[in-house]
Amino acid sequence: MSEANRELQSEVARLIVDALNLDIKPEAIQSEARLYGEGMGLDSIDILEVALAVSKHFGFQLRTDNADNVRIFNSLRSLTEHIAAARTK
């Protein structure tokens, strides 16, 4: 992973912690840990809140009807890779 992507991944982890008011440090989120269900234990409402925060912060919309959402929200790394490819800010 490039230095830019590591920085982006840290930024996304902070965004997740802030958006969900989690009581963990962003560094505690493992890049390959599952976000939804087992792993971080996020539910569909949490994922929706993360999607809204990402949309506002990075300037593009994550759609609920996107067939790739399972892949996009699989882990911190997969979400970061998607943001890197799609962001406008």
Image (tube, grey):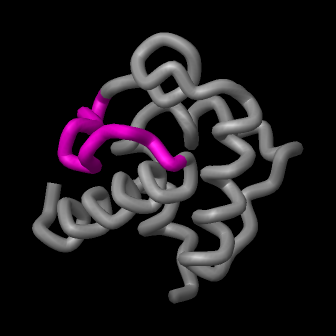
Q: Residue 48, located in which quarter of the rendered image?
A: top right
Furthest residue toward bottom: 89
Furthest residue toward right: 65
**Residue beneath the point at 74% across and 68% down:** 61
Q: Is residue 49 magenta?
A: no
Q: Is 48 left, or right, of 12 in this rendering?
A: right
What stretch of residues is rendered in magenta? 21-32
Q: Which x, y percent locates residue 38? A: 48, 11
**Residue beneath the point at 36% across and 59% down:** 14
Q: Is 76 left, or right, of 26 in this rendering?
A: right
Q: Which x, y percent locates residue 57? A: 56, 77
The secondary structure that most of the magenta stretch takes on is: loop
Q: Which x, y percent locates residue 72? A: 56, 42
Number of numbered discs present? 0
Furthest residue toward left: 3
Q: Which x, y percent locates residue 44? A: 73, 30
On screen, 18 above or below 67? below
